[in-house]
Image (spheres, grey):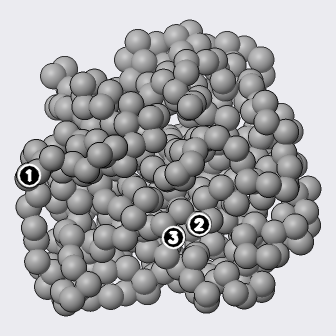
């Protein structure tokens, strides 16, 4: 069980850094990193691409003790995916005002997601941390060898700018009490390339559609296949869904991740060696990994550990928060709810979600028979309606999320 405090990644430093590329807003690439090696073409793909991955790897302080082999990874493990909001030259025109203001040169880790894979029976839990979450930041080591001072309360999305990927890993590790031996930063351009490599992802647009001036989206309700810049803008849209908050956007991103997971496991992708190779190339070209993710055998191990996890055991949740009394635009951890959630994950319990499908009205849950043009909104109860089954933990009502076998639609604000 990996919930043991450690200093993993606490004093991480970059080795042979790759020029920074801008990172996307989803954890789907966590699945890409692990799943590129599945379905019989693992060795061919991973060995061919391993040199490209190693060239831009980030060193974490501690590596996993388990040596890489051709078998599945033993025990549980966690992978941190960080998305930094930067302005890539080729995307500046599409990102508009974001890349023309005073903050256009900044590096903010606006997306932070922790994927935990349990030991047998295997379960996958993806935890999204709000960008405006106020957290304690430990002392970290920068690329140049200098160290930063520990800080008691800072916005989570400022941590990457403090000391890079390793510092974000240390911060999330301290917050969750989970070891984080694997981490990766993913570029904005990766959204375009990875989505295109598999022919796009079909998403569901609910209510009256999405109309968002800031991202240029003006889509009617219904099923929509997104690829390229459309996929990027769908993941970026905040003003087009729910109450137009970052918390609402998280639910929309999780819809994309769930549908991407289904696409990655479909015969359309796994049975096509060419698609897998294009996917692997796109992932490698747009990921800055920890050195622990550069060994090809390690990638195979991680892939084998998760490739057969049923969709009902893949869960997407948002880390529970409450409003910050000192700043209405920020949130702080709900420690009691977070303890229940993280303990249940560490003990490999089945999770019963009693919150909403997404925070702040970002998505609405539908059944397979519902028409996507006008999905019915179901307000979940704040507490469990009945006692959970043996071994299942009923989560507090402010832990929002879904499993990958549930369908959600964007709660569009189109008018």
Residue 280 vertical placement versus 183 (above, below): below
Give the residue at x 31% y 70%.
406
The residue tagged 1 is 385
The residue indicated by pointer 3 is: 261
Residues 404 and 80: in front is: 404
Looking at the rendered structure, the secondary structure element under dot 3 is: helix
67 vs 185: above or below? above
Q: Earlier in the sequence, mark 3 or mark 1?
A: 3
Q: Which disc number belongs to residue 308? A: 2
First of labels 2, 1 by sequence position: 2
Q: Closer to the camera, 365 or 11?
A: 365
Indicate the quadrant containing the C terminus: top left, top right, bottom left or bottom right: bottom left
**Mark 2 vs 3, N-terminal side:** 3
Q: Position of residue 392 (x, y in %)?
A: 31, 46
Q: Nearer the viewer, mark 3 or mark 1?
A: 1
**Rendered view: 376 above or below 148:** below
Residue 228 shown left or right of residue 294 in the figure = left
Residue at 54%, 45% (x, y): give it.
Answer: 118
Count of numbered badges drawn on the protein: 3
Expressed as whole percent of the image width and height from the top left, the position of residue 89 reads 63, 61
Label 2 crowd (10 A; few <14 / some 14-19 / many >=20): few
């Amino acid at each position: 069980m990996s919930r043991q405090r450690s200093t993993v990644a606490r004093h991480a430093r970059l080795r042979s850094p790759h020029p920074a590329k801008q990172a996307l807003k989803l954890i789907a690439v966590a699945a890409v990193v692990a799943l590129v090696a599945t379905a019989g073409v693992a060795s061919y793909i991973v060995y061919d691409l391993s040199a490209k991955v190693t060239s831009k790897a980030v060193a974490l302080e501690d590596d996993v003790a388990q040596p890489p082999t051709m078998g599945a990874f033993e025990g549980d493990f966690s992978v941190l995916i960080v998305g930094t909001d930067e302005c890539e030259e080729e995307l500046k025109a599409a990102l508009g005002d974001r890349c023309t203001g005073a903050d256009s040169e900044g590096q903010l880790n606006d997306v932070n997601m922790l994927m935990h894979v349990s030991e047998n029976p295997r379960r996958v839990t993806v935890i999204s941390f709000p960008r405006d979450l106020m957290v304690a930041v430990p002392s970290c080591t920068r690329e140049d060898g200098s160290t930063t001072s520990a800080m008691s309360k800072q916005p989570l999305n400022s941590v990457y700018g403090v000391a890079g990927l390793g510092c974000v890993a240390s911060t999330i590790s301290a917050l969750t009490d989970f070891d984080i031996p694997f981490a990766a930063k993913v570029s904005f351009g990766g959204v375009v390339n990875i989505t295109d490599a598999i022919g796009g992802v079909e998403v569901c647009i609910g209510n009256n559609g999405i109309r968002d001036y800031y991202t240029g989206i003006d889509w009617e309700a219904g099923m929509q296949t997104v690829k390229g810049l459309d996929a990027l803008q769908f993941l970026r849209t905040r003003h087009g869904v729910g109450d137009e908050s970052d918390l609402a956007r998280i639910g929309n991103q999780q819809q994309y991740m769930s549908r991407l997971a289904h696409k990655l496991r479909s015969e359309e992708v796994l049975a096509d060696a060419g698609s897998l190779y294009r996917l692997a190339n796109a992932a490698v070209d747009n990921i800055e990994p920890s050195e622990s993710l550069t060994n090809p055998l390690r990638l195979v191990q991680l892939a084998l550990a998760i490739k057969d996890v049923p969709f009902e055991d893949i869960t997407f949740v948002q880390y529970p928060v409450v409003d910050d009394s000192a700043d209405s635009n920020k949130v702080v951890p709900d420690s009691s709810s977070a303890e229940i959630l993280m303990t249940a994950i560490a003990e490999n319990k089945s999770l019963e979600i009693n919150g909403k499908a997404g925070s702040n009205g970002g998505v609405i849950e539908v059944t397979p028979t519902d028409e996507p043009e006008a999905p019915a909104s179901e307000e979940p109860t704040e507490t469990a309606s009945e006692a959970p089954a043996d071994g299942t933990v009923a989560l507090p009502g402010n832990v929002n999320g879904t499993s990958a076998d549930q369908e959600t639609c964007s709660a569009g604000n189109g008018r």
